[in-house]
Amino acid sequence: MTVTDEALNFGVQYYETRLGSYDETLTDRGELLPHWQMLLDSLDMLGGDKLEQRRREAQRLLRDNGVTYNVYDELNGTRRPWQLDPVPLLIDADGWEKIADGLQQRAVLFDLIFRDLYGDQRLLHKGVLPAELVYAHQGFLFPCMGLPATDARQLALHAVNLARGPDGRMWVVDDRTQAPSGAGYALENRTVMTRVMPELFHGQSIRRLAAYFRGLHEGLARLAPQRRDDPRVVVLTPGPFNETYFEHAYLASYLGYSLVQGDDLTVRDGRVWLKSLDGLRQVDVILRRVDDSYCDPLELRSESGLGVAGLLEAVRHGKVRVANPLGSSALENPALLPFLPGLCRYLLDEELKLPSLATWWCGQPLERQFVLDNLDRLLVRNINREGGSATLIGDQLTSAERDLLRLRILAEPHLYVGQERVSFSTAPSLVDGQIVPRHAILRTFVSLQGDGEYQVMPGGLTRVAPSEGTLAVSNQAGGVSKDTLVINNRPEPHVSLWLQPQANQLIQPQTRALPSRAADNLFWVGRYLERTEAVARLLRAVLQKSREVRQFGEAESLGCLQVLLRAMTHVTDCYPGFVGEGSEDLLNDPHEELVSLFRDADREGSLAYSLKLFQLTASSVGDLWSSDAWRLVNALEEEWQEASFSQLVDEDRALFHLDQLMLKLMAFNGLIADNLVREPGWVMLDIGRRLERALASLALWRATLVPRHPKGVAQQVMEKVLAVCESLLTYRRRYRSFMHLPTVLELLLLDKAHPRGLAFQLHQLKNDIEVLPRSTPGYRLATDQRILLEAETRLFLSDVTQLATAGQDDGVFQALDDLLAGLSQALWNLSEDLTLTYFSHVQGTRLQQVEVQNEA
Amino acid sequence: MLYQIEHTTLYEYQSSVSLCHNQAYLLPRETPSQTCLTSELRIDPQPSDLIERSDFFGNRRVYFAVEQPHQEQKVTMLGQVRILGELSLFSSGQAISWELARDRLAGDRSRNLLEACPFLYPSRHIPTSPALADYARRSFPPGRLLLDAVKELVARIHCDFIYDPGFTTIATPLDEVLEHRRGVCQDFAHLAIGCLRSLGLAARYVSGYLETLPPPGKTRLVGADASHAWISVLVPGGGWVDFDPTNDQQVSEHHLTVAWGRDFADVVPLKGVAFGGGEHKLKVAVDVQRLE
C-alpha cells in the first residue's frame, strides 16, 4: 500500500478528541476501545480516497432510492437527499444491554403515565404530578379523556433521543411519543451500509434490524380490537409534502400496509373504513404519522384537512386502534423529566434506569429560583413547542432579553423549564475526506411486540452535528446521519418478515386494497407519463426540422416547421403561442417560446410542467413502486434538473436531453408493462396512459393533418407526423414510398395491431374498463362502456378515402376534423365519467358547521 | 321554577350531503341549582349512530352521525328544567380577597382546587395577555373582595362594549374584541374569562339559555330566544359563582345551564363535519317558556 500524505493524516493516527469532551471511541481512562480500534484500523486500510468513494456511493444509492427529507423552506424544491456518513457509531454488547434495559423501562413507565393522565388521574389526585404541568401543556387533549378503555398497553411506539454525557453515561435528551419518526431511515441506512461497507459486517457480529420490524408487525396486529389473525393495518400520512413522507411510504411498503391520507378513510357505523377502488374495507389499526390535534376535525382542530372526522368516536366505540394513541402528545412535555424518578418509584417501585437531562420545572418555587439565578448557564424552554419561544440559551441573550425572559418566567412559571447544558460525546465522522470528532445524538426506537411487551431496536439513528463544536443536531438544520451498529457477543440467526405457515394451512391471498386516492393518482401518473412523452417527441421533431431549415433553407421545410410549431401550441394547450393573431413574429423567431415550452415548470402544458406533475403523482403513491421504479422516477428528476439548469442555447444539447428523457420514459413504460401485477392499480395507470396517448395523438393530427397544405409541405408534414407517432418505419415497410393521406390515416387510425395507433388505444381501454369493479350488474352497459363502444364503432365505420377528400376550395379536410373532434370529445367524457365513478374520495367540500351563541 | 326549552337547528344544503358527523352539547346538565327533568333530541333524518356520554367536565355530550344522503338536517332538543330556588350569592365563605383567591389557586393542589386547574390557563379561544390584565386591573385594587371585583369588571364590560351581532364570527379573536369594543355574549364571556385568567383566577364558560320577558303589555314571541353564554368564577373554598357580562347581571333563576367548559370550543351547542352539501343555510330557533 502506498502511503500518501493524505493517508497519514487520516484515521486512527490522526483522530483525537480535539473538542476536549468525552469521545465514543475511548474508555474513561482514555484508552481506545477494542471494537473502535478494529473499525478505525479497517478505515485506515481503506484510506481516505476509498472512503470518500464509499460515501459518494452511499449518497448515490440513497438518492436513487428516493430517500429524502422534505424541507419546507428551501428555494429549489422541497426535497433534500438524506445524508449518510459511512463511518458508523459502534456500541458494544454490554453497553447496549444497559441502554436497552433502560429504554424498555422508560416505555413501560410512559405507557402507565399516559393511561393514568387520560384515565383516573391518580397521579394528579395524589399530587405525584402537579396538575398545571399537565393541563397547561397543549399536548394534553381533553377530548381524549377516557379513551384508553382497556387495561392493555396503549403506547405502541416510543422514540428516545440519547446522548452520552461527560461522565460516560447515556442521558435522555427528549422523548417522541405522538408520531415518532426515524425507524425507516435507520433501516434504509443499514440497507445502504451493508452494500457500501460490506467489510464491516463480515468481521464482527452485528445485531440485525429485521427482527425489530417483525416484532412491530406482530405488535400492531395484536392491537386490533378484532380479527387479530389478519387485521387491516394502514399507515396514515399527512401526504407527500410532509418532511418524512419518504419514510411513511417506505414503512408501509416494507410492512405490507396500505399508505393512506385522511381523505382515504371514512367513519361509518362507528367503524373506520378505507375507501378503496372496490368499495369500503374495514380498518383495524391505524399507524399514524399525523400529529394528535390534526387527527379528527370533529373533536380536535376543526381546520385540519389531514384527519378523519369521527375518528375519536370510532376509537371510543372500540372498533379501531390508533398507534400511537390519540393524546400521546401530552408525554412530549419537558416538564415531565424532573418528575420521572418519582413517577418511576411510584408506578413501578423501581429506580429510573436512564437519567434524563437535568431539568428544573419553574412551576415549583425552589426550582424557579434556581433557574432565575442561573439563567446564563442554562437552556430555557417553553413546555409548549408552539409557545413562541423555542429553546433559549441563557448566555447568548442580551441582558435586556434576559430580563424579559425573567419576567415571562415569573408571569407564567409553570410554562418554563431550565435545562443543564451538557457537552455531549463526540464520535468519529467523515468530514471533507477526514475523520474528525463531531457531537452525536442517538435516536432509539421502542415498540410493542407480538406478546405485548416492549422491544428495542438494536441500534438506531445517529445524527451528527453539521459543524465542529455545534451541539444542535437536527434534520431540519441539515444534519448528517449514521448507521448505529450494536456489536453482538454471539452470532445472530437470520430473521425475515416472512411467516412460516402451519403444515396444512392454506393462506388466503389478500390483495392490498387500493385506496381511491391512490387509484386517482395512478391514473394521473399514466396521463402525465404519456403527456410528457408526447410533448418531448413533438419538441424533438420541431428541433430537428428547424436544424434542417437552417442547413438547407428550403421553402417546403420552412412550411413544415411552421405547421409543427402550431401543432406544438395545440398539443401543449399553451395558447396563443404559435396560433392566431400576432403569431407571425413568433413563427419567425420561435426560440424563446420553445425554451419556455421546454423548461418553464410553472407553465401548464410545458414539458417541464408535465414532468413535474408526473413526479409528483408518482411520488404520492410511493409505496406502490418497486425500488427500480423509484430509481427511474428519481433518475428522471435528476436528468431534468440538469437539462433545465443548462441554458438551452443550442439545439444539440436540448436534443441530447430529449433523447435521454425519452429513453428513461421508455424504461419506465417497460417496467410497468413487465413488472407490475395486473391488479386494479395497473389498470388505472394503463387507462390513464391510453386515454392520454389517444388525446395527444388526436390533438396532433387535428393540427397537422386536417389543414390542407401545398403538396411538398404536406408530404413533409405527413412524414414528420409518422415519425412523431413512432410509425415511420412501419409505414415505409407497408406502403413503400407512397406518401398519401388515406394510407397514413389507415395506419394511424384503424390498425388495431399498431400500439401507437388510435384503434389500439380504444381497444386497450375497453379491455381495461372491463375489469374495473362495478356496482351495476346485469347486461346494461355502464356509461364508460357505452362511450367507448360508440367511439370505436364510429372510428371503424369511417372510410379513410372519404376522410381524405375535400372540396376544391376547402382549406381543411372537414370530414376528418369532424371525426377527430368527435372522438376527442368522447374521450374527455370518458375521463370525466371515470373520475366521478372511481375517484369518489373527492367527496365535495367538507363543511364545518358551528352555531354561534349570540343572545343579547 | 320550571321551564320548557325547545331549541331547533336546521341546516339546508344546496346539494346532497352524503355523510355527516355531529357533536351536540344541547342536553342540559345537572347543577347544584338545577335539575333536568326531561330531555330528548329529535333528529331528522334519523341518525344511524347516536350515543350520549359524559365528558371530562361532566357535560352531556352527544355524538351522532347521519349516513344517508340528505339535503336538510333538523335537530331539536326538547327539555324541562327546574331551577331550585334562588341561590344566596354572597355566602360568608365567599368573602375572600382576590389576591388570596389567586394565591390559593396557585399554591393549593388539594382535591377541591384540582377541579379548578383546567380553568386557570389559556384555552383555544381565550389567550391570557398583559392587555387583558391591564383592562381588568382597575376593578382589582389591593384587598378587594373577589366577588366585588368580578361584579365590577362585568359591569364595566357591559358598559364599555357594544352588543353587535354583525361584528362577530365564530371565533373572533379576543384582541379584536378588545380593540373594537364590540361583540356578542360569547365574546363578552370570553373577554371576562380572559381578564380573570390573566390575573391568575379560575373562570369557566357557561352555555345555556336566558328566559326573556316580553316588554310590558306585549305577548311573548315564540322561538325568538337564542342560546346564551355567561361566566362562572371560582371562589376557593366557596364554590363557583356565575355572572352574566352581557346583561350586567348576577346569574338568576332565569338562567338555565346546559354545559360548561374552558371556552366556547368545549361546549359548542351543535357542530358537525359534513361531506358534500355545497353552500348551506343555518336556521336556529330557541324557545324558553316558564311553566310554573
Image (cartoon, rainbow, N blue to C red):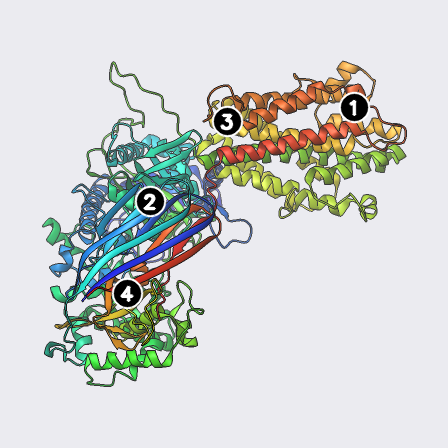
Image spot of residue A755 (x, y percent): 64, 21
In the rendered view, tell whether residue A132 sits above or below residue A435: below
Q: Which mark is residue A803?
A: 1
The chain ID associated with circle 3 is A
The chain ID associated with circle 1 is A
Q: Is residue A403 left or right of residue A222?
A: right
Pick the front one: A840 or A295: A840
In the rendered view, tell whether residue A722 sits above or below residue B165: above
Q: Which mark is residue A443?
A: none
Label 2 neighbourhood size at 10 Å, few (<14), some (14-19), many (20+)?
Answer: many
The chain ID associated with circle 2 is B
SS at circle 2 = strand
Tell me the distance, in whole angstroms, between the alpha carbons under discs 1 and 4: 77 Å
Q: Which mark is residue A682?
A: 3
Image spot of residue A300 (x, y percent): 33, 53
For image coordinates 75% across by 22% down, the residue present is A745
SS at circle 3 = helix
Image spot of residue B64 (x, y percent): 30, 46
Front label number (2 vs 3): 2
